[in-house]
Amino acid sequence: MPDHVYDKVKHSMFKKGHRPYNWKADGSIVERNDKTGRSYLYFKVKDSHWILYHNKIWMDHHGPIPEKHIISFKDGNTLNCDISNLELLSMAENAKRNSIHRFPDDVKEVIRLKAKLTKKIKQNGKK
């Protein structure tokens, strides 16, 4: 940056040792929303390193989470991080739990028919 430009913006630059207004101390817990709008609690381990709070609770009680496993909420409330509400699931079990295969056959058929109908409607709308 040229010196004359640097002198103009110097007063508004971030000063060494200063922290932004939204800085949190290590061990802080904050609530954030994911892409779908679901709220989760996050735990600050150190600067620029946050982990899901329910994962921390699980690890404090049971040790590390095995590879290809997740921690799930038994009651579906993502803000209830009580250890009695947490369960360890493999990613395969979680996929089965959240897929069409969890429904009875007649409901599966309705879901498939709705998807076909939606696809046809979208195709006709593009013409």
Image (cartoon, helix red, strand yellow):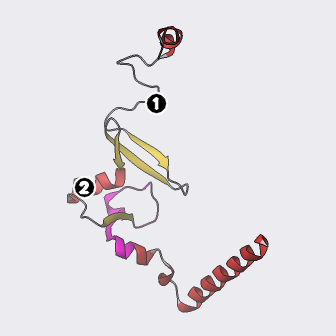
Q: What is the x, y in percent for residue 93? A: 36, 76
Residue at left 45%, top 58%?
Answer: 78
User: Of 116 and 80, which appears nearest the observer?
Assistant: 116
Q: Is residue 124 left or right of residue 64?
A: right
Measured in 3D between alpha carbons, the distance from the residue under mark 1 to the one under mark 2, in whole angstroms, is 27 Å
Please name the amino acid that badge 2 sits on. Met
Q: Amino acid at mark 1?
A: Asn
Instruction: Say which label, 1 or 2, has the lower sequence index.
Output: 1
Specify the segment rendered in magenta: 74-94
- In this rendering, the answer to whether 80 lies above or below 114 is above
Q: Regarding mark 2 in the picture, which secondary structure is present there?
A: helix
Label number found at residue 22: 1
In this rendering, the label closer to the viewer, 1 or 2 = 1
Per the image, is 113 magenta? no
Q: Residue at x 35, y 57 (%)?
A: 82
Count the marks.
2
For disc 2, the marked residue is 59
Image point (65%, 86%), residue name:
113
Tell which of 16 and 123 is nearer to you.
123
Q: Position of residue 119 (x, y in %)?
A: 68, 77
